[in-house]
């Protein structure tokens, strides 16, 4: 058994050498920053918790607790592969170890859309918060398309320049934003006397249907937690640091969301406000705590978090494009690695350009930044769910082939698949109103087109050090 694992790891290492990226450059903390930034934890308290509250009410914290459990199950499945494979192909590389041909490549198409869609979505969030901040500081009303172009352009430049610089920048941006939100939440709890909210813990006026629908949105808050898996070549000791980053980001984000959900629901009840109808919950809580001067700082923190998420998504997506190029799913041009920066230069530029199309088009047609965030984020979520489902289905097969399947691993995989199916079904039925209903058709057409292209080009060449299929 041990010799099989060693040979697998060695094969992965030999394979990694062929990509030309900066090897073992990122510390464990910088690797964690990649996953945590992709989650964009600031989006939960500022955007998503009010939406979950509109469905789950006093059960908002429970929806996030259940979502945390579901995501941790997926994280355990992902980490099971991450400890054996050190490839920049992320979840696609894992599923390709098990599922042959076009079916396994669905993970690549799903992840590519997921990361590009998420970068586009957070660009919308950045546009909303940055525009408010600029208006407050200067009185200027900047064109939304200009703000969006600045966001994606900056994120693309940072991702192109150096993976270590981008990781450190993401780490600081998220640390500042999360610290600020935690401070406001703690002040809110202090103002309410740190008492337990019986309405929430007794789930008063909460329905099972509301919890279920809230769970779907809560799960969406975590997407991107696995993005550190795209740093298989660049992380130090990837077989250990990447699994830890994946699990830690999911766990920390879950605890943060549960904490913020409880405090926001309690804070708005004490203030006699309607959390479900606000677009700036932290502003209101700060004003109630006589900290209204923090409003611009909250906007700046939110904008920074969205920018960090865009950098993270472009970084991860570019590595997947690089891997897809080696599989002949994309032109060989995208195998090019910058001679000095050791980043996949052509792939970064492609992803950056693709991430800019959606926001600029929608904003030009009159959509708001929050509309862009909701629409593009929903589209991206379908891609994540497909990739998560495939990796959770693949792990027990992989373990079985290596004579290491246990009943615990099988149960873990089964529960993760059931949780993801519940989230997928909940997002499809009842059929959401337009334009969200259109996104289902768009994603289906995209996935079919990717599947057809995969059949046409075949699996692609075998990589150095890789075992034949």
Image: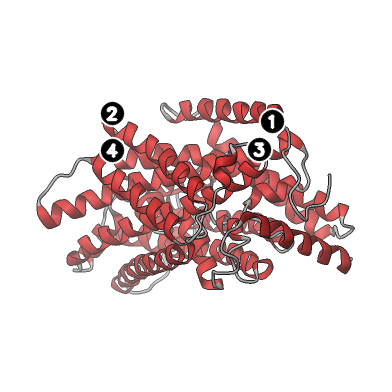
Disc 3 to disc 1, how far (Cα)? 7 Å
Which mark is on residue 365? 2
Which quarter of the image is occupied by the N terminus?
A: bottom right
The kind of secondary structure element at disc 1 is helix
Q: Residues within 10 Å of mark 3 (few under 14, many from 20)?
A: some
Distance CA(mark 3)–CA(mark 4): 38 Å
Quadrant where the C terminus sits is top right
First in residue order: circle 1 vs circle 4: 4
Q: Up-down: is 143 above or below 14?
A: above
| Residue 222 position within the rendered picture, expressed as x and y whole percent measured from the top left | 52, 53
Label 4 Cα neighbours within 10 Å, binned few <14 / some 14-19 / many ≥20: some
Mark whose residue sits in front, 1 or 2? 1
Left or right: where 364 falls relative to 174: left
Residue 457 is labelled as 1
Q: Residues within 10 Å of mark 2 (few under 14, many from 20)?
A: few
Q: Circle 3 sits in a helix, a strand or a loop, which is it?
A: loop
Q: Are marks 3 and 1 in contact (CB under 8 Å)?
A: yes
Secondary structure state at the residue bearing disc 2: loop
Instruction: Using the image as rendered, state which of residue 334 and residue 134 is in the foreground.
Output: 334
Mark nearest the camera among 2 and 4 is 2
Instruction: Point out the frontmost of discs 2 and 3.
Output: 3
Q: Position of residue 353 (x, y in %)?
A: 41, 40
At horizontal 40% and vertical 43% (from top left) the residue drawn is 121
* Of the image marks 3 and 4, the number of the one nearer the N terminus: 3
Q: Nearer the viewer, residue 449 or 185?
A: 449
> First in sequence: mark 1 or mark 2?
2
Q: Which residue is mark 3?
A: 328
Classify residue 65 by image quadrant. Answer: bottom right
Q: Measured along the vertical axis of the image, is residue 389 above or below residue 253?
A: above
Residue, disc 4: 368
């Amino acid at each position: 058994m041990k010799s099989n694992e060693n040979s697998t790891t060695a094969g992965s290492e030999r394979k990694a050498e062929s990509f030309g990226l900066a090897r073992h450059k990122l510390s464990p903390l910088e690797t964690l920053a990649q996953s945590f930034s992709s989650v964009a934890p600031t989006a939960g308290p500022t955007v998503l918790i009010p939406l979950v509250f509109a469905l789950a009410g006093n059960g908002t914290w429970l929806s996030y607790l259940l979502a945390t459990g579901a995501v941790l199950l997926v994280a355990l499945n992902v980490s099971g592969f991450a400890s054996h494979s050190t490839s920049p192909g992320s979840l696609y590389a894992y599923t390709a170890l098990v599922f042959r041909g076009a079916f396994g490549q669905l993970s690549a198409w799903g992840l590519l859309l997921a990361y590009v869609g998420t970068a586009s979505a957070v660009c919308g969030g950045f546009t909303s918060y940055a525009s408010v901040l600029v208006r407050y500081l200067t009185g200027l009303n900047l064109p939304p398309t200009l703000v969006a172009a600045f966001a994606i352009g900056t994120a693309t430049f940072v991702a192109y320049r150096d993976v270590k610089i981008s990781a450190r920048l993401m780490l600081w941006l998220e640390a500042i934003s999360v610290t600020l939100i935690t401070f406001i939440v703690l002040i809110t709890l202090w103002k309410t006397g740190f008492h337990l909210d019986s309405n929430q813990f007794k789930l008063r006026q909460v329905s099972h249907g509301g919890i279920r629908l809230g769970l779907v949105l809560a799960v969406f808050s975590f997407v991107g937690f696995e993005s550190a898996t795209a740093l298989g070549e660049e992380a130090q000791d990837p077989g250990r640091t990447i699994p830890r980053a994946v699990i830690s980001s999911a766990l920390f984000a879950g605890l943060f969301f549960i904490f913020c959900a409880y405090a926001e629901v309690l804070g708005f009840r004490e203030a006699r406000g309607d959390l479900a109808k606000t677009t700036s919950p932290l502003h209101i809580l700060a004003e109630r705590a006589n900290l209204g001067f923090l409003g611009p700082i909250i906007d700046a923190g939110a904008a920074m978090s969205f920018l960090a998420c865009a950098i993270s998504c472009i970084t991860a997506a570019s590595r997947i494009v690089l891997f897809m190029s080696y599989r002949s799913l994309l032109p060989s041009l995208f195998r090019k690695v910058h001679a000095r920066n050791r980043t996949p230069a052509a792939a970064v530029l492609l992803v950056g350009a693709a991430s800019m199309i959606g926001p600029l088009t929608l904003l030009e047609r009159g959509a708001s930044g929050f509309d862009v965030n909701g629409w593009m984020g929903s589209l991206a979520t379908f891609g994540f769910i497909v990739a998560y489902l495939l990796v959770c289905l693949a792990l027990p097969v992989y373990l079985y082939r290596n004579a290491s399947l246990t009943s615990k691993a099988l149960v873990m995989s089964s529960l993760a698949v059931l949780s993801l199916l519940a989230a997928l079904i909940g997002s499809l039925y009842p059929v959401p109103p337009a334009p969200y209903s259109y996104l289902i058709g768009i994603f289906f057409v995209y996935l079919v087109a990717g599947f057809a292209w995969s059949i046409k080009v075949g699996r692609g060449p075998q990589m150095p050090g890789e075992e034949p299929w």
